[in-house]
Amino acid sequence: MQWETVIGLEVHVQLATQSKIFSGASTAFGAAPNTQACAVDLGMPGVLPVLNEQAVAMAVQFGLAIHAEIPEVSVFDRKNYFYPDLPKGYQTSQMYHPIVGAGEVEISLDDGTTRRVRVHHAHLEEDAGKSLHEDFHGMTGIDLNRAGTPLLEIVSEPDMRSAREAAAYLKAIHAIVTYLGISDGNMAEGSMRCDVNVSVRPVGQAEYGTRAEVKNVNSFRFVERAIEYEVERQVELLEDGGKVVQETRLFDPDRDETRSMRTKEEANDYRYFPCPDLLPVVLDQAYVDHLREALPELPDEKRARFQAELGLSAYDAGVLSATREMAEFFEETKDTCGDAKLAANWVMGELAGALNREGLPISDSPVSARQLGELVARVMDDTINGKAAKQVFQALWNGQGKSADEVIEAKGLKQVTDSGAIEAMIDQVIADSPAQVAQYRDAEPDKRGKMIGYFVGQTMKASRGTANPQQVNALLKEKLDALC
């Protein structure tokens, strides 16, 4: 039997506010346990929440970025459950009237195709604390620093049909929230994570299969691996005559498998009801329009501009607009050197290769965008050739100069373009290579092109790599053909 995979994602984005969603406690990462949890976060008797207006603005900005409906009124609800890292006994969330309605996100796949994934809604809620098991030998420690941290939960429709599509959707969400500046998107620090809902059904069947939810997956690669494992598990179970149980599962990246955590709760298990401590949020059109006008250029718009105005290919434009940091680095490089295509080649080639080898994000590149742009400019004006440019890049990477010009001067890499000097070197190479000259003279004309490489290499060696390669090739061909 042929099976179709059906995937929906619930993406939890930590909003980049300075304080929590209902209290003034800090949201800074890395503080000592329980040093950033105030009376409101701890659920102490008599305290009341106060909504963080910046969290509302960030949620609305996201909604506008995905062309979603922005309801005039949204309401906070209490989601009731008991867990040690939730001292109040309930989570303040939005169930029935979320702040962002239906929208859509365009995703780009590796083969260059694009498609749209529908977003059902996005709602604001507070995060819970964190249970710590590793250091307590049979006990559990509770860190409530995260309790009350503002989250935007983005719920997709079940529109994705493969692990690759799900990863592409997650990357698109990551790009949008980081472009907007509403989240740093740091998945390693928990700023973005997702729950993956996976089911399978026979190809052609309209009814959805029973889904399993894989909780708190925190990397693009883990999302793919969790889905691949879960699809294989469900198909094997069904083909063996079993049934998929609706449940919550966890992904173990060390074993590359999912395992059962608990049976899946339904909405009525949480006894949702409107929060009596918070008024409904009412947004007037002027407020929404003000936020719309402040939106930056978003990934899709930037990608389209890179193609239309800068003449980049769809692939190059996609890579260079994938993250805000990459786009900004490329644009500064391009503005410095004045050539978009050459800037793209160097950012995606030499720079990306060095970053990958060192495992560095582009924000930590030892070579700045300005330095790289100056280096590309020196290639463009024939100050250095391509081989020397790579030496300059490596020197800048190792901190051996503040600019390309300084490295070029210090290492004596300036390209020799004086035809007289190049001719002198060529004449010496020809004089020192009688056997090779004889072979060249005796070869068929159509085979001489390959043989000229020896003379080019010797001339470049004599110039210590500084001779202009195009001039060397042209002058060599002229002089060798004259000897035939």
Image (cartoon, rainbow, N blue to C red):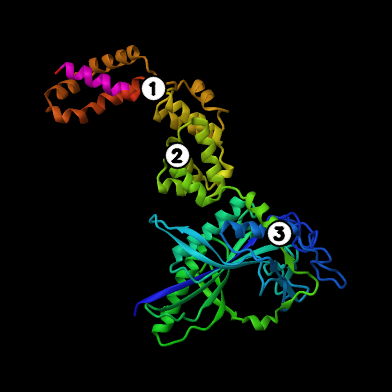
Can you give x and y, in whole percent of width and height, for residue 268 in the image? 66, 83
- Residue closest to the eye, 132 or 241: 241
- Residue closest to the eye, 138 or 68: 68
Name the amino acid, label 3: Ala
| In the displayed structure image, the side of residue 48 where residue 385 appears, left or right | left
* Mark 3 and mark 1: Cα distance apart in space: 60 Å
Residue 475 belongs to magenta span: yes
* Mark 3 and mark 2: Cα distance apart in space: 36 Å
| In the displayed structure image, the side of residue 461 where residue 73 appears, left or right | right
Give the image quarter of residue 286. bottom right
Residue 476 belongs to magenta span: yes
Q: Are marks 3 and 1 in contact (CB under 8 Å)?
A: no
Residue 299 versus residue 91 in the image, above or below: above
Give the image quarter of residue 308. top left
* Mark 2 and mark 1: Cα distance apart in space: 36 Å
Q: Are marks 2 and 1 in contact (CB under 8 Å)?
A: no
List the residue tagged with mark 1.
464
Kindly identify the residue that appears in the image at 50 percent across and 35 percent down. Answer: 334
Q: Residues within 10 Å of mark 2 (few under 14, many from 20)?
A: some
Can you give x and y, in whole percent of width and height, for residue 217 in the image? 56, 66
Kindly identify the residue that appears in the image at 45 percent across and 69 percent down. Answer: 228
Residue 326 versus residue 291 in the image, above or below: above
| In the displayed structure image, the side of residue 363 where residue 133 appears, left or right | right
Look at the numbered disc 1 and give the secondary structure of its residue.
loop
Can you give x and y, in whole percent of width and height, for residue 253 in the image? 53, 66
Q: Which of the labelled discs sits on residue 310, or is there none?
A: 2
Q: Earlier in the sequence, mark 3 or mark 1?
A: 3
Looking at the figure, which quarter contains the C terminus? top left
Kindly identify the residue that appears in the image at 11 percent across and 24 percent down. Answer: 442
Q: Earlier in the sequence, mark 3 or mark 2?
A: 3
List the residue tagged with mark 3.
55
